[in-house]
Amino acid sequence: MATYGDEVAYYESKADEIRRGQLKAVQESAARWSALVTALLGLFTAVAFAGGLSTIDRLSPPLDVIIRVITSVALFSAVVATFLFARARGGLELKRLGWLTGKMLMDREPRLIDAALRNLHWGQRSALLTVALVLGGSAVVLWAPTASPSATPVLARFSDAAVCGRPTVVGGELRVSGRPLREAVEILTVTTCPSPKR
């Protein structure tokens, strides 16, 4: 049977193992998070290409623009997360260490751990933002009303502006470019809508 002193010695050795393995643990966690982001984006890509990216083009304005912005921000966020996870794993920086001693390594390790943890935490935030944007954007694409491809484009003049587009039904009401057609002063059918001036 182990004595109290044996137990203390055992757990002291375990504490040393944990303390000395902190940097490796953070790097392994960053690798797992990076794999998770890659898997989720791979799933999204497979679904997007199977369903066709043209779905965004069939959304009525302004949802089409909103989804394009969400997709762009999600892509940027995914790139940032991937970069931060790579930094947390220690795979992007190489430094030449001069005359190396055990004391230098011992003093350097806490700084490496702090930097890796910072990169890991910001990478996790970026990854969660990416997932939220992808899920939110996907929900909008799946459930938002689409512009009817058979609807004839109309040019609708309102008291403050004129808009052109294909009418959509939203909540039982015909709309064009997000505005209710019942508020239009004048409605004309057109073959195509003019391109916006740049």
Image (cartoon, rainbow, N blue to C red):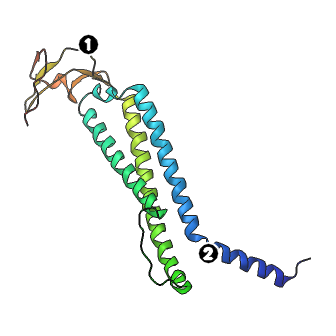
Task: Give the residue displayed 53% in from the left and 80% down from the top.
Answer: 105
Task: Residue lying at the far front in this picture: please name it.
Answer: 99
Where is residue 73 drawn, in percent x and y? 32, 47
Question: Which residue in the protein does label 1 denote?
Answer: 150
- In the rendered view, would you say 182 is above or below 62? above
Residue 46, image x, y percentages: 45, 32
Image quadrant holding the N terminus, namely: bottom right
Query: Dot 1: within a 10 Å radius of its alpha carbon, few (fewer than 14), some, or many (20 or more) residues?
Result: few
Q: Is residue 169 left or right of residue 84?
A: left
Viewer-side residue, 50 vs 150: 50
Q: Residues within 10 Å of mark 2 (few under 14, many from 20)?
A: some
Q: Residue at x 52, y 49 (%)?
A: 35
Q: Is residue 48 above or below residue 123?
A: above
Q: Secondary structure at mark 2?
A: helix
Q: Quadrant of residue 185 in the image? A: top left
Q: Residue at x 45, y 58 (%)?
A: 86
Q: Quadrant of the C terminus?
A: top left
At which x and y percent is residue 79? 37, 51
Name which residue type carries label 1. Ser
The one of 43 and 58 positioned closer to us in this rendering? 43
* Badge 1 element: loop
The residue pinned by badge 2 equals 20
Give the mark count.
Answer: 2
Q: In the image, 82: left or right of 25?
A: left
Amino acid identity at mark 2: Arg
